[in-house]
Amino acid sequence: MLLRPDGHPSSYGHLPDANVTLYNDCVHWCLPGPIDTWSDFLLQTLRMEKVRSYQERLHSSDRKMKF
């Protein structure tokens, strides 16, 4: 698992056995970074795939009805 060192510097952002001082810093939860960008790419790809799949099914059902 890839973790950004500044990504989530609270108790939730470290491995369970990590020896770190725990504090809550909600500002870092919203900062953009490479992980967030890849998440955006993945979500957009999934959305496009859903639309493409729907269009293919719609087109294939039209062909079946025209015989």
Image (cartoon, rainbow, N blue to C red):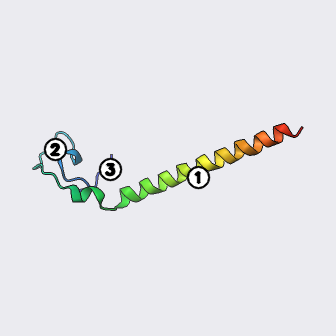
Contact, mark 1 vs mark 2 (Cβ under 8 Å): no
Label 1 to label 2, Cα distance in Å? 39 Å
Residue 15 relative to residue 57: left or right: left
Q: Earlier in the sequence, mark 2 or mark 3?
A: 3
Question: Is disc 3 placed on a helix, strand or loop?
Answer: loop
| Residue that badge 2 annotates | 18
Q: Residues within 10 Å of mark 2 (few under 14, many from 20)?
A: few
| Residue that badge 3 annotates | 2
- Say if residue 46 shows up in the picture: yes
Mark carried by residue 22 = none
Contact, mark 2 vs mark 3 (Cβ under 8 Å): no
Q: Amino acid at mark 3?
A: Leu
Between circles 1 and 2, the one closer to the viewer is 1
Mark carried by residue 48 = 1
Residue 10 relative to residue 52: left or right: left
Label 2 to label 3, Cα distance in Å? 15 Å
Question: Is disc 1 placed on a helix, strand or loop?
Answer: helix
In which quadrant of the rendered view does residue 67 lie?
A: top right
Q: Residues within 10 Å of mark 3 (few under 14, many from 20)?
A: few
